[in-house]
Amino acid sequence: MQREMSIYSAIPKPKQKGFINLVLFLASIAIVVYTGMIESDMTFIEVAGDTIIVSACYLLLYLFILHFRKEILDVSRKILFILAIILAFVIMTKFVITQHQASIIFLVPYALIALVIRSFYDARLAMFILLVTLMLSGFMVTGPFEFIFINLLAGIVAILSLSDINRKYKLIFSSFMVTITYIVIFIALTIRQKGTVSMSELSELKWFIGNGLLLLSGYPIISIFEKKFYFLSDTTMHELSDSNNPLLRRLSEEAPGSYQHSLQVANLAEAASRSIGANVLLSRTGSLYHDIGKITSPEFFIENQKSEGNPHLDLDPEVSSRIIINHVEEGVKLAHDYKIPVQIIDFIKTHHGTKKAYYFYKKYLQKEKTGKLTEVDFQYKGPKPFSREMAIVMMADAVEASSRTLEEYTEETINELVERTVLIQEQEEQFSDAPLTFREITEIKAVFKKRLSNMYHSRIAYP
C-alpha cells in the first residue's frame, strides 16, 4: 500500500521543512570541518577559521538555491541529495590525499558531480555545486589553484558534452572529452611551471585515463539516485516518451484515438510549459501517460468509438460515469505494473482533479428525479494538480478534448473555447494546490489559442 502512495502525500509544513534543511546544512558543515581535522594537528583557532570558511561556502550554496531553484528547498530529500554528493567527494578527497602517492587525487572523477546534478537539474546548478565541492576540497590538497582550475574546466566540458543526456552512448563521448581536457590542461600547467614535461610526469596521465573510465559509472549512479531519492532524470523521461515504450505501444494499438489525443495534449503542454519556464520534458511525458487507463475499456471513450455506435446508450448513467471515472484508477494500476515512476503516475491521478462527470450526472437526474446518488458519486477522486506541470496537463487535456466538438474553427470560437474551459476549472478550484500565478495562466491560454489555431487553420482551396 505504501508503495502506491504518492511521494508527495506527506509533505512537511514550511516551518518543518525550514528546520530540517537547517539541520542538514549544519550537519554537513560539521562533517566537512571534522573531515579536515582528521590526521591534522589543527589548533582551536585554525578549526574556527575552517568553520567560518566552510559555513561561507554552504551559505553561498543556500542563497544560490534560494534565488534560482527555490523549489528544491521545499523538498528536504532534494537538499539531502545535493549535500550527500558534496560530502561524498569531500570525504573521498580527504581519504585519497592521506595515501602515499599524492597524484592519485587525479583519479577522483569530480566531473561526475556535474554529470549527476545535470541529469536531474540544470547546468547552472550543476556548475555551482561542482564549484562549491572543489572549493571545500581545495583546502585539503597541495596546489589548490591547479586542483580547482583543472577540475573546474573538466566539469564544464562534461556539462557541455552531455547537454543532451538522452542517449547512453553520449556518456562515452563525454568521458573521452573530459579525459582529453584533463591531459591537455595538465601538460599545459606542467610546461608553464617547469618549462618542460618529463617522463615521470607523463606517467601521471594514467590517473586521468582512469578518471575518464570512472565517469562511465555515471548512469548506474544516476539510476541509484533515481530510486533512492525518487528523482526522475531527463534520460528516463526520454526513454518513457519513446513511442516504442511497451505501455505507449499498447495505448497506440488498443486505444488509437486516445493515443492521438495524448500526443496533441503533449504538444500543447510542451509549448505552454516552455512559455512559463516549467519542466518541458516532464509535462510532455506526463501528457503521454495521463490517459493510459483507457486501455482497459477503449470502446467507452468517444475518441476510440467507431461507426457501430456508442455503448453508453445502453447503460445507466451511473454505470457509464463509473467506467469513465475508473480510467484514472486503471491507469494508476497499469503504471505500477509497468514500473512507471511515481512522478508520472501523479499526472494520471491529477489530470481530472476533483472534477465531476456532469454529463452523466445530469442524465441521471433526468432519469431519476429522486435518486439517491449525489454529485459526489459522479466525482473524480483526485487529488488536484499540485505542480505547474500537472496543472498545464489538466488544462491541455480539457482544451484539446473540447476543441474536437467545435463545429467551426475560427479565431473567435477557439478563443472562447479556451477561455471558457480554463475558467470552469478555475471556478472549481482545480488549481488551488498548484503554484501557478494569474500571469502564467494567461500565458498558457495564449499558447493554447495559438497552437489550436495552427492545428485547425483553414486550408487554401487550390484550383
Image: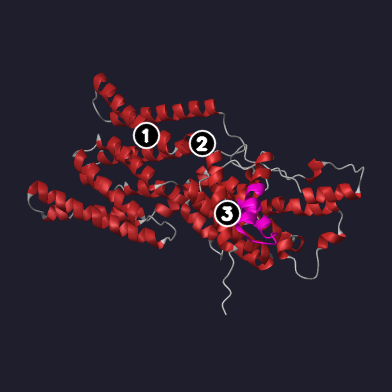
Callout 3–callout 1 Cβ contact below 8 Å: no
Q: Which quadrant holds the N terminus? A: top right
Q: Report the Cα–Cα distance between label 1 and label 2.
A: 16 Å
For image coordinates 54% across by 59% down, the residue present is 241
Q: Report the Cα–Cα distance between label 3 and label 1.
A: 40 Å
Quarter of the image where one finds residue 124: top left
Q: Which of the labelled discs sits on residue 75, or is there none?
A: 2
Q: Secondary structure at mark 2?
A: loop
- Viewer-nearest of labels 3 and 1? 3
Q: Amino acid at mark 3?
A: Lys
The picture places residue 317, in percent across and down from the top left corner, at 84, 52
User: Does residue 206 lie above or below 22 as drawn?
Assistant: below
The tag earlier along the polypeptide, 3 or 1, is 1
Question: Pointer 1: residues within 10 angstroms few (<14), some, or many (20+)?
Answer: some
Question: Pointer 3: residues within 10 angstroms few (<14), some, or many (20+)?
Answer: many
Q: In the rendered view, does 283 fall on the left or right side of 187?
A: right
Q: Residue furthest top?
A: 44
The picture places residue 7, in percent across and down from the top left corner, at 59, 41
For image coordinates 56% across by 77% down, the residue present is 462
The picture places residue 448, in percent across and down from the top left corner, at 57, 53
Q: Amino acid at mark 2?
A: Val
Q: Which of the labelled discs sits on residue 449, or is there none?
A: 3
Q: Report the Cα–Cα distance between label 2 and label 3.
A: 34 Å
For image coordinates 55% across by 50% down, the residue present is 446
For image coordinates 75% across by 69% down, the residue present is 306
Quarter of the image where one finds residue 302: bottom right
Question: Pointer 2: residues within 10 angstroms few (<14), some, or many (20+)?
Answer: some
Q: Which of the labelled discs sits on residue 61, or is there none?
A: 1
> Can residue 343 be spotted in the picture?
no
